[in-house]
């Protein structure tokens, strides 16, 4: 997805009171590669990956890897299990209270349910076409899949394992976030807008343009200060007020963004891009963010997860062949990942 000098982090406990709110001063950079872990070839030999989900209770990473989920110990990089025989995996949502995980399988147009202890698939739930992002909303206690082919969202009761609603999304939904209070925000990639969805009534309440960002994929949220972080494939990061839809600030970013992660404890915002650039920003106030540092990672390193205790970032990628020469059929040929080179990169201080 979407040579810089690195400096050691300077710990600072100074607080800035701005508008009645206290914001921790940002560290002065220092994120760098700590470790690499080989994760092995994808089944069938075709490398493809998407979302990574971190489970803070078990310190496990659930890593999308084409037709399987790799389950990895985040502390040492050991592959502790897998969920195989899928079609084309996108995301993973966890409902720890029920001991269940949910996988969006875009190739099968379904959400799969697995047992968090045994990693065995227990149920298949039909969704809309090509479910991509999948999240758990704690307010409604429902699972939502954002279906890129049918332009809708499937709402699943994780207890009864049934689809309880289907919500038209007016375009191709991409990444979504929940505020925990009954609102879900989703990028509509082909309409260059964000929709605000009420998870209590399963209705869309607002459509907001994201200009100057376009073709948004990545999203995260500062729930406390009501800010959405929207990553556009036109190399623009937009910061939006989640109550009004107003874009309050933008930044240039690398090409192929696919993950934004906001860390409330530090006020840091991490943006990973396919170009191999990790952008790190800091929330100085709800309407003012600043650049902390820009870190060169590796090409393809666009999907990311965060351990909030250690502040480590987990990013996956692989080696790539050079892009083929453009043709009439493929005017924008892309580099191809090489089978057997899939790996996990760990970044931290």
Image: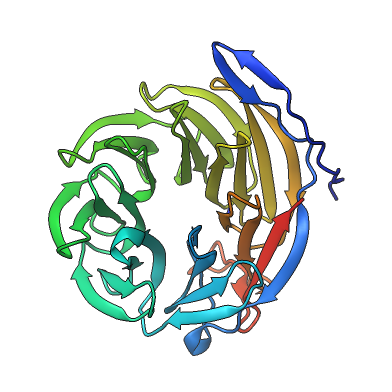
| Position of the N terminus by quadrant | bottom right
Instruction: Give the colour scheme of this rendering.
Output: rainbow
Identify the residue shown where x is 18% and y is 39%.
200
Q: Total of numbered circles in the picture?
A: 0
- Relative to 225, residue 348 above or below: below
- Relative to 64, residue 120 above or below: below
Looking at the image, can residue 234 be seen?
A: no
Looking at the image, can residue 29 be seen?
A: yes
Q: Which quadrant holds residue 110?
A: bottom left
Left or right: 64 with respect to 32? left
Measured as percent of width and height from the top left, residue 100 is found at: 31, 67
- Of residues 6 and 239, which is closer to you in this image? 6
Identify the residue shown where x is 62% and y is 76%.
342
Q: Which quadrant holds residue 188?
A: top left
Measured as percent of width and height from the top left, residue 321 is found at: 67, 75
Q: Residue furthest top?
A: 19
Measured as percent of width and height from the top left, residue 52 is found at: 50, 62
Left or right: 4 with respect to 75? right
Left or right: 334 with respect to 228? right
Identify the residue shown where x is 61% and y is 50%.
309
Measured as percent of width and height from the top left, residue 136 is found at: 32, 52
Identify the residue shown where x is 40% and y is 71%.
89
Q: Residue furthest bottom?
A: 44
- Relative to 145, residue 71 above or below: below
């Amino acid at each position: 997805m979407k040579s810089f000098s690195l400096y050691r982090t300077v710990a600072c406990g100074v607080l800035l009171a701005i508008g009645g709110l206290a914001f921790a001063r940002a560290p002065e950079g220092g994120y760098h590669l700590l470790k690499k872990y080989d994760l092995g070839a994808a089944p069938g030999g075709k490398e493809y990956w998407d979302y990574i989900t971190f489970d803070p209770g078990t310190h496990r990473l659930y890593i999308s890897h084409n037709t399987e989920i790799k389950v990895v110990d985040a502390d040492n990089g050991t592959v502790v299990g897998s969920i195989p025989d899928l079609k084309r995996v996108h995301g993973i949502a966890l409902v720890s209270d029920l001991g269940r995980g949910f996988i969006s399988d875009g190739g099968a147009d379904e959400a799969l349910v697995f047992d968090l202890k045994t990693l065995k698939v227990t149920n298949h739930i039909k969704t809309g076409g090509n479910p991509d992002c999948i999240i758990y909303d704690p307010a409604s206690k429902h699972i939502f899949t954002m279906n890129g082919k049918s332009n809708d969202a499937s709402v699943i009761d994780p207890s009864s394992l049934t689809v309880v609603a289907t919500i038209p999304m007016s375009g191709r939904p991409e990444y979504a976030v929940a505020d925990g209070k009954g609102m879900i925000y989703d990028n509509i990639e082909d309409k260059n807008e964000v929709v605000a969805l009420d998870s209590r009534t399963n209705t869309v309440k607002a459509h907001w343009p994201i200009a100057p960002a376009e073709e948004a994929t990545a999203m995260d949220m500062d729930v406390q200060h009501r800010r959405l972080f929207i990553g556009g494939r036109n190399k623009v990061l937009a910061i939006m007020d989640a109550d009004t839809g107003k874009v309050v600030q933008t930044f240039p970013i690398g090409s192929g963004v696919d993950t934004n992660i906001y860390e409330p404890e530090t006020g840091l915002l991490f943006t990973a891009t396919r170009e191999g650039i990790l952008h790190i920003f800091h929330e100085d106030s709800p309407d003012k963010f600043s650049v902390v540092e820009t870190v060169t990672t590796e090409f393809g390193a666009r999907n990311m997860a965060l351990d909030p205790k250690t502040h480590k970032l987990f990013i996956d990628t692989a080696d790539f062949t050079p892009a083929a020469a453009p043709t009439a059929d493929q005017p924008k040929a892309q580099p191809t990942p090489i089978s057997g080179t899939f790996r996990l990169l760990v970044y931290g201080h």
